[in-house]
């Protein structure tokens, strides 16, 4: 694959998708891939807003600039945050409407870029408000989720959600804001990251953060312990861990690029194992039939980005990374068609590819 091919593909996909933008600025909602949630447009609009900004920078086509402003308008609307605190990301009576930490992290990620690219001050204000509204457990170095009205939920135990929420704070800081509380909390989280990272075989990061909440009542402690035991024995949970591994790798790459401080985790033995196994055949074989890989998480983009950020594209690794990139695009260009794919969400996640050198080389060289 060359930069022109990837770049042209993303531009063409964005051209095809921009006509689907609703009058209120929202983009079509998906169903959170294999989780089959009833999503609101918040998540996909946040993703597309980033792509619109990046394609505008590349093409100077005002249609994409206008689409980015319209997406920002939706993300700043009462419809997107009806409770006035967290974003309404899904409607499911059995789950929180905020989609834990990750729903908010995706919104903050987008608002940070919209503030930086479009200069919309309200994007910065709302992003900071949403981030700070999440309570932080200083002893654990982890965040609580909140409901859409700001009421605290338990400390979130999903690894990728804590990682991406920290990343959203880093992106806020890198957009030019100076918030000491965000700096402090992100720093504490990163300093505790090693103890919250548990590796399965083949260097796959376990999907869950294992800890005992000493301040919970007895009923909650027993429930947490029983849940931990059942998940360790659940083969499906191993599938989730493998399917989300690349999503974590992508976040590591983003943290390396945008965090200005020292990250001790990147010098740890655990992370060395993660790096050495990111293109391990045993790990990659787990993805062939994994419903969370490629068809939901854009695994090919994510591993390629990780390899770029940590300079792993050598000794034949670059060929493997590009093969994964090609495989990922097969799910976008109708070479692989499946009724099980949430195409609205998968297409929105093309934004992850705009950070790849394969895309940005063309922008840097001033080609079009």
Image: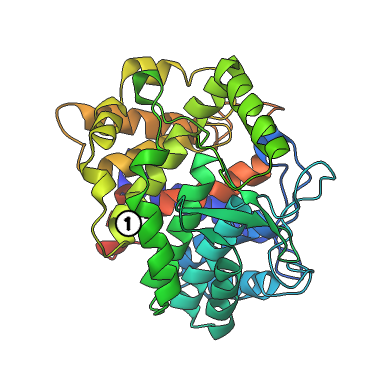
Q: Residue at x 56, y 72 (%)?
A: 127
Question: On screen, 121 above or below 20?
Answer: below
Question: On screen, 328 above or below 365?
Answer: above
Residue 150 picture location, percent across and down: 71, 66
Q: Bin the neighbour count of mark 1 within 10 Å (Cα to Cα): few under 14, some 14-19, many 20 and up.
A: some
Asked which quadrant contains residue 246, the reply is: top left
Quadrant of the frame with the N terminus: top left
Residue 359 appears in the figure:
no
Q: Residue furthest left?
A: 315
Quadrant of the frame with the C terminus: bottom left
Residue 97 picture location, percent across and down: 76, 53
Q: Residue at x 74, y 68 (%)?
A: 81
Q: Residue at x 40, y 31 (%)?
A: 198
Q: Residue furthest right?
A: 93
Q: How is the image coloured?
A: rainbow
Front residue (pair 339, 112) = 112
Asked which quadrant contains residue 17, the reply is: bottom right
Residue 79 picture location, percent across and down: 79, 69
Is 151 situated left or right of 49 in this image?
right
Is 132 situated left or right of 279 in this image?
right
Residue 365 picture location, percent across and down: 24, 62
Check disc 1 and report the residue beneath it: 360
């Amino acid at each position: 694959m060359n930069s022109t091919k990837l770049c042209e593909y993303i531009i063409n996909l964005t051209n095809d998708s921009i006509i689907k933008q609703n009058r209120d600025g929202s983009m079509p909602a998906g169903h959170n891939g294999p989780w089959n949630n009833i999503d609101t447009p918040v998540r996909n609009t946040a993703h597309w807003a980033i792509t619109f900004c990046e394609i505008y920078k590349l093409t100077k086509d005002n249609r994409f600039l206008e689409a980015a402003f319209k997406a920002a308008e939706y993300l700043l609307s009462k419809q997107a945050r009806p409770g006035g605190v967290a974003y309404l990301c899904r409607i499911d009576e059995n789950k929180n409407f905020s989609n834990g930490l990750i729903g908010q992290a995706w919104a903050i990620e987008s608002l940070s870029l919209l503030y930086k690219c479009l200069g919309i001050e309200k994007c910065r204000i709302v992003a900071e408000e949403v981030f700070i509204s999440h309570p932080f457990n200083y002893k654990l170095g982890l965040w609580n989720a909140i409901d859409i009205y700001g009421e605290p939920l338990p400390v979130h135990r999903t690894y990728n959600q804590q990682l991406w929420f920290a990343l959203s704070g880093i992106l806020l800081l890198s957009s030019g804001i100076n918030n000491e509380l965000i700096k402090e909390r992100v720093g504490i989280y990163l300093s505790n990251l090693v103890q919250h990272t548990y590796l399965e075989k083949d260097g796959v990061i376990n999907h869950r953060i294992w800890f005992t909440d000493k301040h919970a009542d007895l009923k909650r402690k027993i429930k947490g312990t029983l849940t931990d035991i059942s998940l360790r024995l659940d083969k499906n949970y191993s599938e989730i861990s493998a399917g989300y591994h690349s999503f974590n790798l992508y976040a590591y790459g983003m943290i390396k690029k945008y965090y200005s401080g020292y990250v001790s985790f990147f010098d740890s033995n655990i992370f060395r194992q993660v790096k050495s196994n990111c293109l391990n055949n045993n790990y990659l074989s787990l993805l062939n039939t994994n419903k969370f890989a490629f068809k939901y998480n854009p695994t090919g983009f994510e591993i390629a980005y990780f390899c770029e950020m940590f300079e792993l594209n050598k000794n034949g690794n670059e060929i493997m990374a590009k093969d994964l990139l090609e495989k990922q695009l097969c799910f976008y260009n109708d070479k692989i068609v499946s009724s099980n794919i949430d195409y609205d969400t998968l297409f929105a996640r093309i934004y992850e590819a705009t950070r790849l050198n394969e895309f940005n080389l063309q922008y840097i060289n001033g080609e079009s």
